[in-house]
Image (spheres, helix red, strand yellow):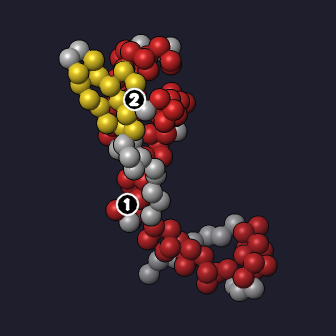
């Protein structure tokens, strides 16, 4: 049998004031709810997408693509002031997370936002 989780004293008083119930009985419910959320298959996808946007260069790129519609890798490089390899790295992350699509035209790669590029939280 699992032992009850240790509850921080300040949390006990806050939960008692909030719910009027004994926190010892509701904390396991919150833990179960948390486990249910994180086990949802959509959770890992949403987390990966959020992490993809948690970088200043990638977030800037998404904002630029939103304003311009389409940018070549060299235009993104010029806008960010980084190396071509760094642009490739960032764009791979944005592609893998479903935010952008790439279109090769000869030597050039053009990027644009995917139509449904928002983060969906389960």
Residue situated furthest bottom in the rendering: 21
Q: Nearer the viewer, residue 69 or 63?
A: 69
Q: Quadrant of residue 85?
A: top left
Does the rendering let one see residue 97? no
In the image, residue 113 above or below residue 1: above
For the question of whether residue 17 can be seen, the reply is yes
Secondary structure beneath dot 2 equals loop
Q: Which residue is mark 2?
A: 70
Above or below, 122 relative to 15: above
- Left/right of residue 105 with respect to residue 15 in the rendered view: left
Which residue appears at 39% of the width and 50% of the height?
116
Q: Residues within 10 Å of mark 1 (few under 14, many from 20)?
A: few
Residue 59 drawn above or below residue 74: below
Q: 10 Å neighbourhood of mark 2: few (<14), some, or many (≥20)?
A: some
Please state the horizontal and vertical placement of residue 10, each as a whole percent of the image. 76, 67
Q: Which of the two discs, 2 and 1, labels the residue nearer the N terminus?
A: 1
Q: Which mark is residue 65?
A: none
Relative to the observer, which residue lies in front, 71 or 39?
Answer: 71
Q: Residue, x 41% and y 47% (percent of image)? A: 117
Cα distance between the residues tagged 2 and 1: 28 Å
Where does the N terminus fall, quadrant-wise? bottom left
Assess whether mark 1 and mark 2 are in contact (beta carbons under 8 angstroms). Answer: no
Per the image, the residue denoted by label 1 is 42
Residue 110 in the image: state x and y as whole percent: 32, 25
Disc 1 on helix, strand or loop? helix
Residue 93: percent from the left, percent from the top? 37, 35
């Amino acid at each position: 049998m699992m032992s009850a989780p240790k509850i921080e004293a300040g949390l006990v008083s806050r939960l008692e004031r909030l719910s009027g119930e004994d926190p010892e009985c509701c904390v396991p419910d919150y833990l179960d709810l948390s486990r249910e959320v994180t086990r949802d298959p959509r959770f890992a996808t949403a987390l990966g997408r959020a992490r993809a946007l948690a970088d200043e260069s990638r977030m800037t790129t998404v904002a630029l693509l939103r304003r311009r519609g389409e940018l070549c890798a060299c235009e993104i490089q010029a806008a960010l002031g980084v190396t071509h390899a760094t642009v490739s790295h960032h764009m791979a992350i944005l592609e893998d997370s479903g935010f952008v699509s790439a279109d090769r035209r000869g030597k050039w790669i053009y990027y644009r936002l995917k139509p449904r590029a928002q983060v969906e939280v389960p």
